[in-house]
Image (tube, rainbow, N blue to C red):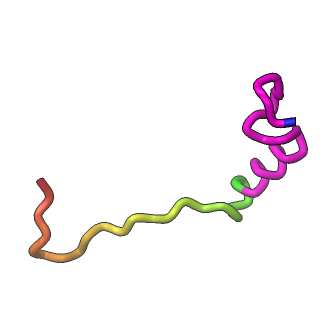
Amino acid sequence: MYGPNNRFRPFCDERCKNMDLGAWASERFKLPEQLPNRDPDFEQS
């Protein structure tokens, strides 16, 4: 199932691959947003 010869790595099979892609496309998975520091005394170097 999960081995070097599995063409769907890192997924177990095509179904899992498509489910993961669909979750990203429908925005069920999201990366956390980093908000800018709004502190006026904050200095970026």
Depth check: give the residue in front, 22 or 6.
Answer: 6
In the displayed structure image, the side of residue 17 where residue 34 appears, left or right: left
Give x and y (percent) for residue 44.
14, 58
Specify the quadrant of the image occupied by residue 35.
Answer: bottom left
The residue closer to the viewer here, 34 or 16, is: 16
Q: Residue furthest top?
A: 5
Q: In terms of image quadrants, where is residue 10? A: top right
Q: Is residue 13 magenta?
A: yes
Residue at position x 60%, y 62% in the image: 30
Q: Residue at x 50, y 64 (%)?
A: 32
Between 28 and 15, the one lying in front of the other is: 15
| 17 up-or-down from 28: above or below | above
- In the figure, is residue 35 to the left or right of 2? left
Of the pair 19 and 9, the residue shown nearer to us: 9
Q: Is residue 43 magenta?
A: no
x and y percentages locating residue 7 in the rendered image: 81, 27
Residue 15, position as x, y percentages in the image = 90, 45
Q: Quadrant of residue 4?
A: top right
- Name the quarter where the N terminus is drawn: top right
Look at the picture and state if 41 lies above or below 27.
below
Placement of 32 over or under 12, stated as above or below: below
Numbered-mark total: 0
Name the residue at 70% across, 64% down: 28
Image: magenta residue range? 2-23
